Image: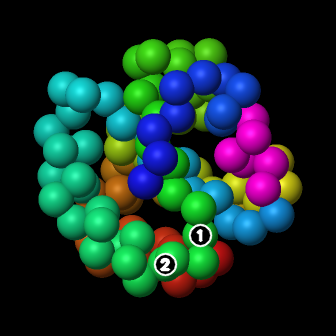
Amino acid sequence: MQIITSEEQFADAIAKDEYTVMKFITTWCPDCKNLNRFIDEIIALHTEKNWFEINAEEFPELSERYEVRGVPSLLVYKKGEKIAHLHSKFAKTKKQILDFLATI
C-alpha cells in the first residue's frame, strides 16, 4: 500500500483506469489500528486494485471534498470518479470490507 504525501499524488492515484482504493485513516484512531491488522490479507485477495493510504488529518480539504466523516473509511475511484464509499461505521471488520469490495 502506497502512502499519499501530496494532493498531486492523490489526484494521480484516483485518475487511474483501474480501481483505486483509498484508505482514509488517522494515527490515533483505534479502529484504524485494528484495520491495519488484517488489511494486507484483504489486499492480497484484491491485487487487481491499486491501494493507497492517506492521513485524513494531514489532508483535511481532501477529506471534506470527498465526504469522509469518520475513519477508517475506504473510498473507491476509477478514472477520477468516486464510485463507492465504505463509511467508518461499516469499515471495522474484515467481513464488512470484503463484502463491500465484492460489490465493486
Residue drawn at (64%, 58%), measured in percent from left and top? 20
Residue positioned 36% across, 36% down in the render: 25
Q: Residue at x 60, y 23 (%)?
A: 6
Main SS category, magenta section: helix
Quadrant for the N terminus, please: bottom left
Measured Cα–Cα span from mark 1 to mark 2: 6 Å
The magenta region covers 11-16
Taking the image as shown, residue 51 lies to the left or right of residue 17, namely left
Report x, y in % for residue 87. Answer: 46, 49
Q: Are marks 1 and 2 in contact (CB under 8 Å)?
A: yes
Between 79 and 1, the one lying in front of the other is 1
Quadrant showing the C terminus:
bottom right
Query: Can residue 87 be seen at all in this image of the molecule?
Result: no
The amino acid marked with disc number 2 is His
Above-or-below relation of 71 to 60: below
Q: Position of residue 98 (x, y in %)?
A: 40, 77
Task: State the count of labels.
Answer: 2
Near-viewer residue (80 or 31): 80
Residue at (51, 77) in percent of width and height: 47
In the image, residue 13 lies in the stretch drawn in magenta: yes
Left or right relative to 61: residue 77 = right
Q: Secondary structure at mark 2?
A: loop
Above or below: residue 69 compared with residue 42: above
Relative image position of residue 77 (x, y in whole percent):
70, 55
Quarter of the image for residue 71 reads top left
Q: Which mark is residue 93?
A: none
Residue holding disc 2: 46
- Amino acid under disc 1: Lys
Bin the neighbour count of mark 1 within 10 Å (Cα to Cα): few under 14, some 14-19, many 20 and up.
Answer: some
User: Disc 1 marks which residue?
Assistant: 49
Where is residue 11? Give x, y as percent.
74, 35
